[in-house]
Amino acid sequence: QKEVEQNSGPLSVPEGAIASLNCTYSDRVSQSFFWYRQYSGKSPELIMSIYSNGDKEDGRFTAQLNKASQYVSLLIRDSQPSDSATYLCAVQTGANNLFFGTGTRLTVIP
Amino acid sequence: DTGVSQDPRHKITKRGQNVTFRCDPISEHNRLYWYRQTLGQGPEFLTYFQNEAQLEKSRLLSDRFSAERPKGSFSTLEIQRTEQGDSAMYLCASSTGTGVGEQFFGPGTRLTVL
């Protein structure tokens, strides 16, 4: 059984701060890792993908992967109220389906 | 808008009725996935197509569920004899056929079974 664990939160940060979201996974053969953002009542929106150990930056978002520790994280710099959403971590092996965590709810306080 | 469309966006039905949902993937994507999401949970995989071939089905996909992708383009998901426990958001995603392929989700169909 593949498991993806996230802190459910809620996580609250003040506007302009760094939000740090964490995810661990159980299947060592997992190859691809994704972060999706989901606003209430909407579908998941892909914001980051990472495949290799280390950091990957895209604008205010940085994804970090450590396969040895089976850990992936997402940092959001200069958090904005519009970043308030649920962030879903997803793990994939090969070209197959995604396994999702339950998500972390982030609230950015103006 | 990711380019994946789903229809209908909302469906309310009575227990025991059959429902069918449609997904149109991004045109150049040959992989299509169906997921189900309930409140407070992440999406759960239901089934996956590569072109018209259904390659994998989750144990969540009971015999009341069937999915097709007849010409490798759009897909349908049918639920027969709906139960209240089927109430959920049904999500479709698509990806390219090369490499691992990032999956892009449609807006979903929200099903309410009364």
Image (cartoon, coloured by chain):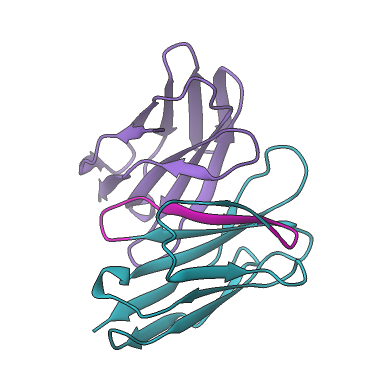
Chain colours: A purple, B cyan
Screen quadrant of the N terminus of chain A: top left
Residue bounds of the magenta highlight: B38-53
- Residue B50 within the magenta-colored segment of the rendering: yes
Given the current orientation, which residue lies at the most extreme top position?
A68
- Number of numbered labels in the structure image: 0
Q: Is residue B107 visible?
A: no
Q: Is residue B79 above or below residue B34?
A: below
Q: What's the residue at 39%, 24% (across, down)?
A: A26
Q: Is residue A66 above or below residue A86?
A: above
Of B56 and A61, nearer the camera is B56
Given the current orientation, which residue lies at the most extreme front position?
B63
Q: Position of residue B112 (x, y in %)?
A: 30, 79
Q: Is residue A47 above or below residue B61?
A: above
Quadrant of residue A42 within the rendered picture:
bottom left
Q: Is residue B60 above or below residue A55?
A: below
Q: Position of residue B109 (x, y in %)?
A: 45, 74
Q: Position of residue B56 (x, y in %)?
A: 58, 50
Quadrant of residue B62 within the rendered picture:
bottom left
Q: What's the residue at 31%, 45% (across, down)?
A: A102
- Left or right? Give the position of A29 relative to B28: left
- Residue A51 within the magenta-colored segment of the rendering: no
- Left or right? Give the position of A27 relative to B74: left
Q: Is residue B23 visible?
A: yes
Quadrant of residue A71 within the rendered picture:
top left
Of B38 and A13, nearer the camera is B38
- Left or right? Give the position of A110 relative to A75: left
Q: Position of residue B90 (x, y in %)?
A: 44, 67
